Image (cartoon, coloured by chain):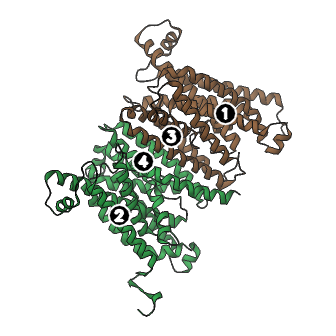
Amino acid sequence: MHAPPVGRSRTRRQAGATVVLAVLLAVAIALSLSIGARSIPLSTVLDALRGSASTADAVVITSQRLPRTLLGLLAGLAFGMAGALMQGHTRNPLAEPGLFGVNAGAGFAVAIMAFAFGVSTPIGIIGAALIGAALASFLVFFLGLGHLRGGALVMLAVIGTTVSALLSSLTSGIVLLDRQSLDVMRFWEVGSLAGRDTSYVPLLAVLIVTGAVVAIANGFSINSLGLGEDVARSLGVSIIAARVLGIIGITLLAGAATAACGPVLFVGLVAPHAARLISGHDYRWLVPQAGLIGAALLLIADTIGRVIASPGELQVGIVMSIVGAPVLIAITRRRRMVAL
Amino acid sequence: MSTETRTGWAIGPVGTRWRRRTAIATLVSILLLLAMWWLTMTTGALAISPGRVVATLTGGGTRIENLVIIDRRLSRLLAGSLIGFCLGTSGALTQTITRNPIATPDILGVSAGAGTFAVLALVRPETTERLLGVSTTVALVPVAILGGLITTGVILTLGWRGGFDGYRLVLVGLGINALALALTSWLLTRAEVEEASVAVRWLVGSLGGVRMGDVVYLAPMVVLAVLVCLRLAGGLGALRLGRDIGQALGVSAGRTEAGALITAVALVSVATAAAGPIAFVAFVAPQVAMRLFGTAGPPPLASGLVGALLLVGADFLAARLPLELPVGIVTSVLGAPVLLYLMTRHLRRTSV
């Protein structure tokens, strides 16, 4: 018989796993910076980042790849953490901002803002995305917090995807009616890191970092909420505060990430499940680990999209669907749909 | 004709009783469809008077009128009605054999899968020609049907786990749908697509690209479908009572289900080859038909009629917006709320 793992060794293991994931993310960042239409050796990348090179390659790195990688890093981190929060709160293994319509809500709000009211400032666009995400995540909580079992868990996913389909149809409708913006939105709609306005990055970074802090803090309450609301209350957790904090975190993360790269599906589904395989159900660790995995996943998907369709490129949203759909099917094929 | 309850007709195994509601609903649907045809024929970018429409159809039109009425509007209406019929009937067949309103080919991703194979054939014309020995335009429909059948096989295999569970099937279908659409987008980036509208057609479905040539293979398919549905009607009706009761009534459940499934997949694949994966018509039409015709389950042929009406109506709307939208967007916007309504009603019933 093994002795049950004591607190310290478990913490050490979790910290070790997190470090490994951080290294994985660093590799993904390096790949994202050096691979593309034109492969650039890592040494040149490092020189360019230090500012000590002024070749054409260095200009490519600093003006194009760096902002794109940064955007992917932020968006992936945000989608992964938002997925972990949604799975933790709804205890639904299929919960994720993409499948449940939060991203589509943000995307629809952006389309309305941009094409119906003609707003194109970063603050306007990001504000719209946040409002759309907030409304959608509130709806998900409202529908998803009953004591759902088996079929109803799946129903919620189907409802979410239908809402997503409806909203993205409306978005395409609005966009197609405005011919000039068609080309920009056509790529944004399926999720892409290419050609994004870099002036968004600072504001997005602030929002996503805030959201990440909220999410990690919320992870502590999710652990207690997992024992049931009554037990959590007796442990001194304020249920309302925890849920509201969860909605705020999901809104900031999913809204800002959607504003960054469009309504990408499946990152928020795959990342928390991968993290759960590595380190179990402890949401104090699961939330940040899902963020690291999400960021690495999105960056690798983006890099793959740049390579396999050259000379053109495949939008990251499409690569994520090809990677993520089999995961969705695998989860579905488990013996029973169990609430998390 | 001795009593009112026994009026009707029968030819061999096929027959029907005279029901007033069915007759009225059929008449209303046909009249509405004719009205949509009339509206579409006479209005649009170029308004043409009814008299001129009749004259053109009977062979007395000017060059412009011939172009607009025959080449554009008539072919689009004919193809649209036939495609709508295919979608509606195929949805009714799958809803009947699965006894699940959500299990339709468009929601499960069968049409998206058929579309992926069709695009594959289009993107790789030389490979298609070498493998099949015919040109891509000829191969498109068979390839789409093959794609639909393969996709269905994959969905059924992945959804099987000691039996079919409706929810699992739907979720597997959602995954397959996302996968197929992503693969289609990928294939389209590899293709030299001159216009974005072609891409839109293969991703959301549009009647913008249909030609008279599509009617040539759509029409026989619809005739075949009508015959198969008439042949299967009795068996499907018995299976609606449950597999066991159906078999006790002398229906071969496996054969009826297989026949209906293959017909449904072939129909939806042909429709997809012509217009791309149009969403929600196969799902909504049978549900509307069931309520309109007052039947116990989704009626295959009536659903086809309603499907034609829905698609022609949606296309009428889509083509007359300030800038033309692909019809698939309009059907999604109209169909998604119906799905949401059915789902939430079900959710309320099962969760409390």
Res. B329 mark: 4
Closer to the chain start, of discs 2 and 4, is 2
* Mark 4 on the same chain as mark 1: no
Residue occupied by mark 1: A248
Quadrant into which the C terminus of chain A falls: top right
Q: Are marks 3 and 4 in contact (CB under 8 Å)?
A: no
Q: Amino acid at mark 4?
A: Ile
The residue mark sitting in front, 3 or 4, is: 4
Residue type, mark 1 in image? Ile
Q: Quarter of the image holding residue A138? A: top right
Q: Is residue B221 visible?
A: no
Q: CA distance from mark 3 to mark 4?
A: 21 Å
Image location (x, y in percent) of residue A135: 60, 40
**Letter of the chain shown green in the rendering:** B
Cα separation between marks 3 and 1: 26 Å
Characterize the local packing of mark 3: few (<14), some (14-19) or many (20 or more) Cα atoms within 10 angstroms: many
Residue B59 falls left or right of residue B91: left
> What's the colour of chain A in the image?
brown
Query: What is the C-alpha distance between the residues marked 4 and 1?
Result: 32 Å
Tell me the chain of label 4: B
The residue shown at (29%, 37%) is: B194
CB under 8 Å between discs 2 and 3? no
